[in-house]
Image (cartoon, helix red, strand yellow):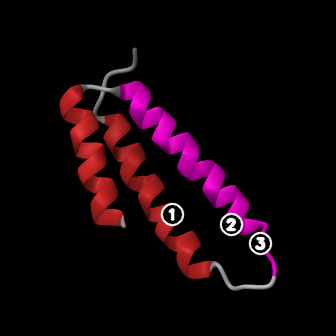
Amino acid sequence: MSHSVELIVNGYIRLNDRAALEKLLAHRQELLRQLRSVTGIDPRQTVAQVSQEIAIIEAGLATIAPE
């Protein structure tokens, strides 16, 4: 999934769509919060993947000037 997120982030960067990147980041952060509260299964692999996606999105946001 991280490669897919990279492609999406790159598309938003080309479009200079900071709002879409911020919305994507908020979604992934909420997903991470929910995963950390899961019981009954081991979400470590998914947590690591979502954390990596958050890093990719944040790097993309750093390339777009704030509005």
Q: Answer whether residue 19 is magenta in the image.
A: yes
Point 80% across, 84% down: residue: 40
Classify 61 as above or below 37. above
Residue 15, labelled with which disc?
A: none
Q: Is residue 40 left or right of residue 22?
A: right
Q: Position of residue 28 (x, y in %)?
A: 54, 51
Looking at the figure, which quarter contains the N terminus?
Answer: bottom left
Q: Which residue is mark 2?
A: 35
Are circles 2 and 3 on residues that touch, CB within 8 Å?
Answer: yes
Q: Which residue is mark 1?
A: 50
Classify 6 as above or below 36. above
Query: Regarding mark 2 in the picture, which secondary structure is present there?
Result: helix
Q: Answer whether residue 32 is magenta in the image.
A: yes
Looking at the figure, which quarter contains the C terminus?
Answer: top left
Label 3 Cα neighbours within 10 Å, binned few <14 / some 14-19 / many ≥20: few
In magenta, the rendered stretch is: 18-39
Q: Position of residue 65 (x, y in %)?
A: 32, 22
Query: Regarding mark 1 in the picture, which secondary structure is present there?
Result: helix
